[in-house]
Amino acid sequence: MIVLHATIAILAVVLLIIVLDIDPVISLVIGSLYLGLAGGVGFEGTIEAIGTGFGDIMAEVGLLIGFGVLMGSLLFAMGALHRLVNLLLKVLGAKRLPYALAATMTTLFPSIYVDVQLVLASPLARSAAPQLGQQGLGLMGGALTAGILVGYVFVIPGLGTVSIAGLLGVPLGTMLIYGLLIGPLTAVITVFLYAQLLKRGFWNPEKDEHASEALIEAEQLAEEQAADRKTEGGEAKLPSLFVSLLPVLVPLLLIAFGAIADTAGFSNKVIAFFGNPILALFLGLLGAFALSQRTLGKDDTNEALSRGFDTTGQILLVTGVGGSLGAVIAATDLDKVLGDLFTADAGAPVIVSILIAWLIAAVLHLAIGSISVAAITASGILGPILHQLDVPVAIIGLAIGAGALFALHVNSNFFWMFQTLLGVSTRGALKALTFVTAMASVVALPLIAVLSLIV
């Protein structure tokens, strides 16, 4: 019966979100309440599990998410990504830009909220597209998709990755190392395969591209503002590109060094202190704040922080109630039933475990339309049974991330933002976004499987 109740609870969450358009936070709490009461946890036990689960996950990842979003908001305001892509275009040329853009955004910018990355990078993709020929906009759209969303689910401090690591109890240093092995490689391979399809006529500019008048007007306005800023000498106030990227690079290096030191056995209290992800990201936030105060001024800095605080609230709530669902599941006997799925003698238990974790997250994403909610929910489902698996927890986390990436489509607000900002039709968005996320999700699977045989 517990499997039936769990199925009903998950389906209820899905239907509440996609049919009744109820916020994921409310939907997840309703699902948790139903599962707890129907699964025999009891009235008091259910409420206690919801509260405890929320608190535990907030203690694990709350500050990390907050610091990451605030830092991303400040970097956005300073135009760090804009200047980086312009530099790549100048140094690498247009043909190499899609690969460099995907790898760079996956590796260096997962701390920036995905909507912000899309808003910032889509004009640059449109401006570079004509230099790539008739398939240019489709290729740049696919590169943006891979760069933004692969980093979101694989690379620390991407919000999806942080949430998965927190819910599964994976050390962030470990997740960082594994993510840096899987993420950029997944993004580049995906762009390469997608480019081969485009060469064979997969993209039809007449049917797949549709720039609105509003988009064209916005681009013209941006060009005029840039010209005005240059005339006024505004660009001279900005720090160098390397300095602008330090708030992201320094935390990544500190976390990575701390993890390597711990693994190699030469860690000490000082290394552990500065390698702690919370402190590392806070130092990055301090650096971004200082740069912003110096270059943009107090008012613009406060405005950027305000946007970051607005974004943080919803992310924290969704992540927290995902922890609540996991806690309720842990309070039932569902872990024993789900554990049986991983005990089948299939000759390749590690691969089977990876595939099941991927499938659960993929189905949830297809239904719910949110990468983060799918990843959080799948982590909540699988978290209680991880002790039964003969697979490194980080590998299961990567498999969940890959599954949660699968086929982002029309039930996601990101889909419609992508279509509008990139200037493509719905058909074009299905190709450059839905198809590319499905491809990246599948491309990551064999990479994760190979990694599982090594670690």
Image (cartoon, helix red, strand yellow):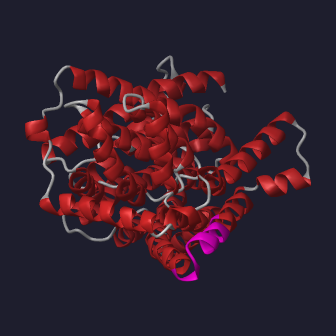
Magenta stretch contains residue 175: no
Residue 1 point in image, percent of width and height = 36, 53
- Indicate whether 308 appears above or below 319: below
Residue at the extreme bottom: 299
Task: Indicate left or right for 205 with 403 as reference.
Answer: left
Question: Which range is magenta?
Answer: 288-299
- On screen, residue 166 above or below 430: below
Instruction: Identify the residue at the far left of this view.
Output: 206
Q: Main secondary structure of the magenta part?
A: helix
- Residue, far front: 231
Q: Position of residue 49 (x, y in %)?
A: 54, 69
- Tell me the residue at 58%/78% (across/down): 297
Q: Provide residue 392's location: percent of width, then percent of height.
A: 63, 35
Instruction: Name which quarter of the figure residue 115 lies in.
Output: bottom left
Residue at image coords 62%, 43%: 175
Q: Is residue 334 visible?
A: no
In this view, 76 is above or below 402: below
In this rendering, position of residue 276 left or right of residue 371: right
Image quarter (top left, top right, bottom left or bottom right) of the C terminus: top right
Residue 306: where, in percent of width, then height?
A: 49, 79
User: Number of callouts in the render?
Assistant: 0
Instruction: Name the foreground residue: 255 vs 240.
Output: 240
Which residue lies at the image location 44% right of the left edge and 42% below the top edge?
150
Above or below, comparing residue 441 to residue 6 in the picture = above
Pick whichever, 59 or 69, lies toward us.
69
